[in-house]
Structures are given as C-alpha cells and as structure tokens.
Image: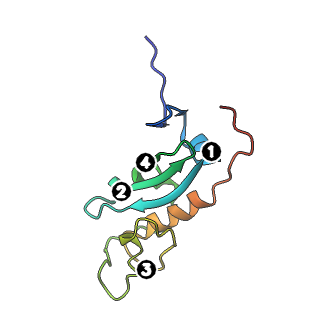
C-alpha cells in the first residue's frame, strides 16, 4: 500500500496541501498569528485562517529554514529591549531585538510576503 505524503490537511474541509510551497502560496489561506512556546521555540505555532472557516496551526520548525540570519541565544522577554510582540498571537511585526525569538519574527515576514497563486484548482 502506497501512502501519500501531505504537508497539511484542513481539519474542517479536508483539503490537502502536498507541500509547504503550495500551502504558503494558497490564496485561500491567511497568516493571522504566531503562538509562542518559550521553552522550545520550534514548538511554537504559526496560525492561518482557511476560507472554509477554520484556523490551522503549523509548528514553527516547519518554517525555520526560511530564516538565514543570525540565531541569538538569549531571550529578552520582559527586559527593556523587548517589544513583547511574541506575547500577542496576532502581532506579526518584525522585532529589532537581538533575542532568540527574533528569527520567528523574520519568518513571519517571509510568510506574510509569500507570493500567492492567482489560480488555484480545487
């Protein structure tokens, strides 16, 4: 028996995205936020609304390779240098802090500006 590999399946309508690029390029999906996981940043969740009315989550580790900049080791949450963007799920702004969470803020920018497919066959 051959099993097909999928990147994400919509829990409401059952639509299957076969890879990350088709997922990010789907005009029926909209990035709405990031839910931080401070103990393990790669376990944080990127949140997307699908036009069927559901919200999908994708672990941050699935997008980590979209960032090629420096990885900082110190978390600045709660310090004067922190804008607290990570504490608000719907805050998609980049963060200038040299914080271990900064890479996620940059990945949010990459995803936000990902080109959407104009024609999508469903």
Alpha carbon separation for disc pair 3 and 4: 24 Å
- Residue 55 pos. (x, y %): 46, 48
Mark identifier at residue 26: 1
Mark identifier at residue 58: 4
Apparent side of residue 66 relative to residue 59 in the rendered image (left or right): right
- Looking at marks 1 and 2 on the same chain, the residue that comes earlier in the sequence is marked by 1
- Looking at marks 3 and 2 on the same chain, the residue that comes earlier in the sequence is marked by 2
Whether the residues at callouts 4 and 1 have beta carbons within 8 Å, the answer is no
Alpha carbon separation for disc pair 1 and 2: 22 Å
Mark identifier at residue 97: 3
- Residue 117 pos. (x, y %): 70, 45
Mark identifier at residue 44: 2
- Residue 90 pos. (x, y %): 46, 66
Residue 1, by quadrant, is: top left
Task: Please rate how many residues cluster around mark 1, counting C-alpha atoms within 10 Å: few if below 14, some from 14 to 19, many from 20.
Answer: some
Whether the residues at callouts 1 and 2 have beta carbons within 8 Å, the answer is no
Whether the residues at callouts 3 and 2 have beta carbons within 8 Å, the answer is no
Q: Residue furthest right?
A: 118
| Residue depth check, mark 1 versus mark 3: number of the one nearer the observer | 1
Q: Residue at x 43, y 36 (%)?
A: 11
Apparent side of residue 99 relative to residue 31 in the rendered image (left or right): left
Task: Please rate how many residues cluster around mark 3, counting C-alpha atoms within 10 Å: few if below 14, some from 14 to 19, many from 20.
Answer: some
Q: Residue furthest left?
A: 39
């Amino acid at each position: 028996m051959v099993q097909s590999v999928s990147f994400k399946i919509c829990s409401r309508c059952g639509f299957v995205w076969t890879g990350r690029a088709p997922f990010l390029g789907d005009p029926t999906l909209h990035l709405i936020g990031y839910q931080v996981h401070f103990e393990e940043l790669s376990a944080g969740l990127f949140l997307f609304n699908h036009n069927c009315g559901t919200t999908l989550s994708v672990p941050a580790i699935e997008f980590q390779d979209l960032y090629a900049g420096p990885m900082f080791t110190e978390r600045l949450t709660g310090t004067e240098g922190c804008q607290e963007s990570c504490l608000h799920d719907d805050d998609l702004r980049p963060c200038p802090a040299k914080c271990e969470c900064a890479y996620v803020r940059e990945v949010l920018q990459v995803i936000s500006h990902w080109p959407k497919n104009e024609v999508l066959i469903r």
